[in-house]
Image (spheres, coloured by chain):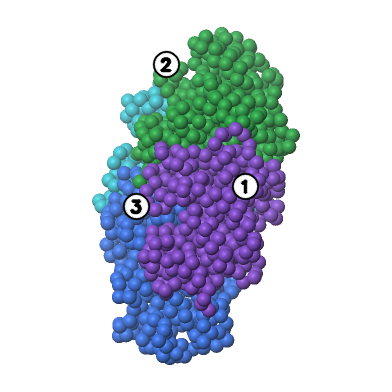
Chain colours: A blue, B cyan, C green, D purple
């Protein structure tokens, strides 16, 4: 694996590295960690890779790696959003499959271009919607698919954070609040896309229209930092999506509640190892990660016995494990791919447009 | 105290009785528990009052009680919504102060009439927004007022229930889903009003416009059972109100989160004895009911030491305690009154209207 | 009902009053609230009873109340421990049934005398082990009795508090740490007895021997404030009882976990409205107060629907409700009585003796 | 790194591999995974190492690895307890530092021999007390050391599990309940040692005497599966250690509560990313992993921002990270070493002896 981005000060770069390597199916061996050659070299040292393989440019990396017998098999893109498309374009052109941080691009038109590029390249493309890697998210999906909740009628997916409640200070905050780098969506692109995708992932439903109210709450902020979106799904189910980065005290509170005519379920990212299931007769069951109640989608992606908490890195590793599987020619139907990329950017684009003049429902058409 | 409503099968009647009497400042001594004389008599027995004071009609009760030296000092109205106005009108005309279950009436025009009646009668009127009786709700209000959260920017108030996810079976369910008895609002009137009032109570802000999406999710239901309402407050703060009665497994999950530019707070009705406070520097403090951190509004309404849980009945009793205070001529500034009645019904009316054609923001004007 | 004790500054007096009256089967009408006549009068006012029935002495109360047609039917003893026996003796001699705060007496020999007195008087005697009044404690007992856990093998009952971690300041703290008033047991008598009784109540098992290690942790304290007791039950099951009043931050953390060869259960007093059940196959079920899963013992002692929390006062009221039932000649098999009184004091006495020289198992023989 | 043990069916082998490699400072390159050559080869494949480096014997591994320029720098011992000493002896003799699963050996005399071997070899030895790797455990230790709790008076450390409540089925269960392989301690050695060490780690106190009651609850089990141990620390503080493997429904519930004269703290392994701190004035603070309140011991061992849960594998990785540091000649004062090994086995030995005839306090002398 070659990393694109993840240079000095990156939060997500080292996390991709750990996640990718956790199951020993992937190894980080090269990278173009920064557009600044010195920074790229410095990052290469921190990742403990061969200094010769910390490249100053994408072109250099692709050329050199293709020339090696033991060159990289794919690239992982972890740079800010506006770099995603150029990086993916170059990688696909050079014949490398791509796994990319989300959102897939910074604009919808870029996502459309990317979709076409992936199709014409005939190469694998995956999107790291990390939270779908949690075993109990996969269990939730399997339970819904098996009919445990009956027909889905309602869902509430929330993604509260508080880290941008003050001034945007630091590398992470700066690019995420700069439309030139993040795209037109701020919070809606950064975390709203996770919530949108998670709800579709668990329920198997697709959003067909939405009503969005996005705002920049912190004075002077050029992108949204607080989002309320009403959703309608293709079976008529009602959804509410709340995402915010100004809710002081909230950390990374992604959570989802799904209700059907027979039951309900609740999952929370910050306590990811339990899934609560309700049934219409008043019974409440708690399902534990690693426990005997889990189906194969969850059980096969669990590394520790019940009571030994797995967390964010393990969920992330499950995404890479799926990606390694598809690269080997195996099936990994739960791995988010280019369709999620396009849907996600369509969601961001539609929500941003809809929010300019909140005047009712707007179709979400991919 | 004389009870109006609360006949056989009533959930809320016995609860009002317990709450009213808990602090021994009020005693239930009379009632017109049902429009059916036999049922009223039967209920009188179950409440263990003097059989002679279980009246067959309001007129009979008011006449007889006024003739007694030890007659009732006020009435408590706990009948279904459509009875609220006639009962209050008769009581006020007979010179009795009124404490009433919410929503205050079944329609906005009734609430406007009631407002005028209360004003002209010059008698006390209170509305049992039970949840404002919880000590930690009052503490939350005090902390916000003292500036602990800074300027309020955002709040999320949710009231999920699941008990109407199936067919509406039983006395409680039947009248609440019948517009002739409940009024045009179903869920929005039954529990949405609590959420609306709680948020204004804690923050001191007033809603100035809203965007509402109400639906009858259960097929054939003539009133809404699932509500999403976006709120704007008079200081520009953004609010989201979610209320539902079809979320299977949810019991009585009223909860509120409030965020300012300096801090945040979280309170949940089902675990009412803790209040969580967050500050911008990352600190999280848990405040306990009965503990030494509480201010006078909370401390004066707590009956047990920390760790001895108080609950719904004690919160309810605090409302009656405030009402007893105002009847004695004392001040009870936190007691919900006729203004809350009118605001609540304006909220229901505005939300129902706004939801008929979801096309943007609608002013809420009282 | 006539109250004995509960004078100015009493925590438990007002709580008994609320609990006794909650279901309108009992009314506080008289009392000898203090051995100081002025204090008794003052307390009478605070309880809002007829001033003539706030008596300066037990003799005065018994004489006057027996002379009335509407005199009290029983007394409730809420004074410090060393008053329990004299008060009960006088009441029984005067022909009044007794309900008493626990521990029943301050010494074992007093409890033995009391047992004989109750037997010879042929009058009802009940002990307010409040926590057995919680609906889910009764549900737990019913589940164990029905075999849901199989054969009980192990239990852990804990009662951590922290309010005596510093100097014993205030009326409550002072008498509880004074052996002349509390008896030889401090923490073990005050809260250890609750834990001991709760475990026997839920499991139906009886302790046959124990190993105790009690200590006065706060320098200079003349009674124990931290207790560890190992228990053996009559079926061979192993128990651990931890009680402490010096665990800073603990409030009133009574909790119990019971394990059999087929399942386990967990209940916590501070979140009393859920009961967690585990089965050997890895399933975890959460049972909610007020919900449809409850058996009659719990359901008949619940006043509110699921999600409307009941707490300590309602649990206490259930004890009084049972006492009212037995006074009416009905059965109330779950009401703690004189056997619990004697067992409890035997437990305290045995634990205090055993702890003087911790040298192995000591039989608990009633 | 070369692994000793961790062959087919091992739970702990793959976990050591993930933990060791997480921070890219260590790589698994060789192993003697089983005493059966075929099994060792098979395991080597599953770990994806060079087949030539999956050795059939320790001798073969040490000889071959010493002959390589890129041979292993140390071994990690993850085989059942009775193999620990022979494996460590051989490794030390061959000049390899050792990191070992706990308990260090199967008997105390073996631990004493091991202590001497380590001393004479002059090589690093570490013991994987995983739970001390959790950032908030290290934070707890730092807070205690800084005096936040005042003088420690009391602690309760519990390690409940339920997985051995039935028959011991499967590889993990079988060797752990076989004294020939586990040593004389069952539960006390397997998990009691973790609890013992965690309490000393956090408080800095040392146990000086104990009273133990161990039992084999499951009929026919030849080792203890349920343990109660009373502890006295060198400053006079009182401790209670509960460990069990027959508590149905408990998963891996290690938790600790520590109380001083100024404050208290609570930490639970199953929700490892919060630490609760209480102070004598009634304040409760919740500290979050990854948050700004953490001191350097915790902050330097955290890989993700607050709200992104880390778990068991990350805690384990912190132990390896410390070991890598000491191998590089750096300081890692929190890394458990040979002293913990000897203390742990002394604890097991003392507890097993003490429990044969429970007759009071037994000194714990290392």
- The residue indicated by pointer 1 is D258
Q: Which mark is residue D324?
A: none
Q: Which residue is mark 2?
A: C329
Pointer 1 chain: D
Q: Tell me the crowding category of disc 2: few under 14, some 14 to 19, or many 20 or more residues within 10 angstroms, Cα based.
A: few
Provide residue D348's location: percent of width, then percent of height: 56, 46
Front residue of B82 and B299: B299
Work out whether residue D18 or residue C346 is closer to the camera in this orientation and state it.
D18
Of badges 2 and 1, nearer the viewer stands 1
Reading the image, the residue beneath label 3 is A293
Report if residue B185 is visible in the image.
no
| CB-based contact (under 8 Å), mark 2 and mark 1 | no
Query: At numbered mark 1, what does the secondary structure look like: helix, strand or loop?
Result: strand
Q: Residue C5 placed where, x, y %?
A: 62, 22
Residue A11 horizontal/vertical position (percent): 53, 72
Whether the residues at callouts 3 and 1 have beta carbons within 8 Å, the answer is no
Check if mark 3 and mark 1 are on a common chain: no
Q: Secondary structure at mark 3?
A: loop
Chain under disc 3: A
The answer for how far apart the CA atoms under marks 3 and 1 are is: 35 Å
- The kind of secondary structure element at disc 2 is loop
Point 47% across, 90% down: residue: A60
Alpha carbon distance from label 2 to label 1: 49 Å
Please tell me how crowded label 3 is: few (under 14), some (14-19), or many (20+) other residues with Cα within 10 Å: some
Please, which chain is the residue tagged with disc 2 on? C
Looking at the image, is mark 2 or mark 3 nearer the viewer? 3
Q: Residue drawn 69% across and 45% down?
A: D234
Eyeballing the image, is D111 above or below C106? Answer: below
Query: Residue C198, position in %: x, y?
Result: 50, 31
As drawn, which residue projects farthest toward the right? C220
């Amino acid at each position: 694996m070659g990393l694109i981005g993840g240079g000095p000060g990156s939060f997500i770069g080292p996390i991709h590295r750990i996640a990718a390597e956790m199951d020993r199916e992937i190894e980080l061996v090269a990278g173009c960690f920064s557009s600044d050659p010195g920074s790229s070299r410095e990052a290469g040292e921190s990742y403990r890779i061969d200094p010769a393989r910390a490249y100053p440019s994408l072109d250099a990396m692709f050329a050199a790696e293709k020339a090696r017998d033991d060159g990289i098999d794919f690239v992982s893109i972890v740079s800010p959003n506006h770099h995603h498309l150029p990086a993916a374009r170059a990688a696909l052109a050079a014949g490398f499959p791509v796994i990319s941080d989300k959102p897939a691009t910074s604009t919808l038109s870029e996502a459309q271009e990317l979709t076409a590029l992936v199709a014409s390249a005939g190469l694998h493309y995956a999107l790291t919607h990390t939270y779908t890697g949690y075993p109990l998210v996969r269990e939730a999906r399997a339970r819904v698919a098996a009919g445990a909740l009956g027909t889905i009628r309602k869902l509430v997916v929330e993604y509260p954070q508080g880290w941008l409640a003050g001034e945007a200070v630091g590398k992470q905050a700066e690019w995420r609040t700069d439309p030139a780098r993040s795209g037109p969506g701020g919070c809606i692109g950064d975390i709203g896309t996770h919530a949108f995708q998670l709800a579709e992932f668990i329920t198997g439903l697709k959003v067909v229209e939405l009503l969005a109210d996005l705002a920049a709450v912190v004075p002077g902020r050029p992108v949204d930092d607080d989002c309320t979106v009403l959703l309608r799904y293709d079976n008529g189910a009602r959804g509410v999506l709340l995402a915010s980065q100004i809710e002081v005290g909230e950390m990374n509170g992604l959570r989802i509640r799904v209700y059907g005519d027979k039951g309900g379920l609740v999952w929370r990212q910050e306590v990811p190892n339990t899934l609560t299931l309700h049934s219409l007769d008043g019974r409440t069951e708690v399902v534990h990660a690693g426990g005997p109640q889990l189906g194969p989608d969850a059980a096969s992606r669990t590394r520790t016995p019940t009571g030994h908490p797995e967390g964010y890195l393990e969920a992330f590793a499950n995404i890479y494990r799926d990606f390694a599987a598809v690269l080997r020619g195996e099936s990994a139907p739960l791995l988010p791919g280019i369709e999620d990329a396009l849907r996600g950017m369509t969601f961001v684009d539609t929500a941003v447009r809809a929010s300019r003049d909140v005047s009712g429902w707007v179709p979400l058409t991919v």
